[in-house]
Amino acid sequence: MNKFNDSAIQILKETDKPLHYKEITRLAIDKGILQTMGATPWATMNAQLSMDIINNGESSIFYRAQPGFFGLKTQGIIKHVKVSAKTKIIKHKVTDSLNTKQKGDIAEARVAELLTLYGVEGLSCYRPISDDEGIDIIAKRREKLEVAYIQVKSSFGYKDRGFVSTVREKQIKNKERMILVFVYFDLSEGDLFDQIFCIPAPDFLRLTANEDKKPGERVFTVGLRNPDKSKYSEFMIEKRELANRIIEIMDKL
């Protein structure tokens, strides 16, 4: 067990209720339970707890009560649907006939759905008629003239490939208001992988500045086994936290 998980267990035992990962982190640091030099310890906390659930499944001591909130299974009743050994499980085959544009459209639609449905504040989403400038979604805060420009980069596979995306440099504006969202569409589940990456353009350019690449391209590669250990880990979030993260970025502008 790592120091983030250990501190989360202690805080959750003391509070006896699920807490948002930012609150878990704040309390752990305030009480001296967690000591870290990282700039975004709450992001690491979210990543560590999320990966514990992903890697350990039902054996994990943690559970996600709702987007961004974690609790201890020992403090609540978790209902699991048990499938009988005699039950025939039907696997639905995903078509292989989709082209790259169709896959991209599907991923963008799912991201727009996440932005619209979840979050402490409402976001309205608009799709530009043309995406030549690398903007797939314009997210606007409701009742406010504040927007973020989002480029969605998607990978599709059966938990074997991971996040692998190429971004053309000319489509990246070095502005905080431009945000790159990297998603993995799991064809075995028919939905986005629970963890996604939400990276402001300046941070993405900084992190990929010294990599060998083709002229005019930046490459994003993260495996599914330990995405929380990549150099992009501070930008990894649970997919239903995307709207909240976009709003946090807007608040800093």
Image: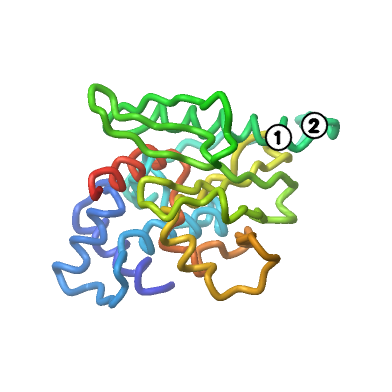
Residue located at (26% from left, 64% from top): 10
Residue located at (41% from left, 41% from top): 242
Up/down of 134 relative to 220, above or below = above
Label 2 element class: loop
Residue nearer the viewer, 49 or 82? 49
Residue nearer the viewer, 90 or 205? 205
Q: What amino acid does circle 2 point to? A: Leu
Residue 152 sits in quarter: top right
Count up the numbered dots.
2
Toward the left, the furthest residue is: 30
The residue that mark 2 highlights is: 98
Up/down of 75 relative to 222, above or below = above
Q: Residue 74 carries which label?
A: none
Lower sequence index among marks 1 and 2: 2
Label 1 element class: helix
Residue 230 visible to the viewer? no
Q: Are marks 1 and 2 in contact (CB under 8 Å)?
A: yes
Q: What amino acid does circle 1 point to? A: Lys
The residue that mark 1 highlights is: 103
Could you tell me how far apart the alpha carbons at marks 1 and 2 are, in whole angstroms? 6 Å
Residue 95 sits in quarter: top right
Residue nearer the viewer, 140 or 71? 140
Using residue 31 as the reference point, say whether residue 129 is left or right of it: right
Residue 160, position in %: x, y? 74, 55
Residue located at (80% from left, 31% from top): 98
Residue nearer the viewer, 192 or 90? 192
Residue 166, position in %: x, y? 66, 55
Using residue 239 as the reference point, say whether residue 46 is left or right of it: left
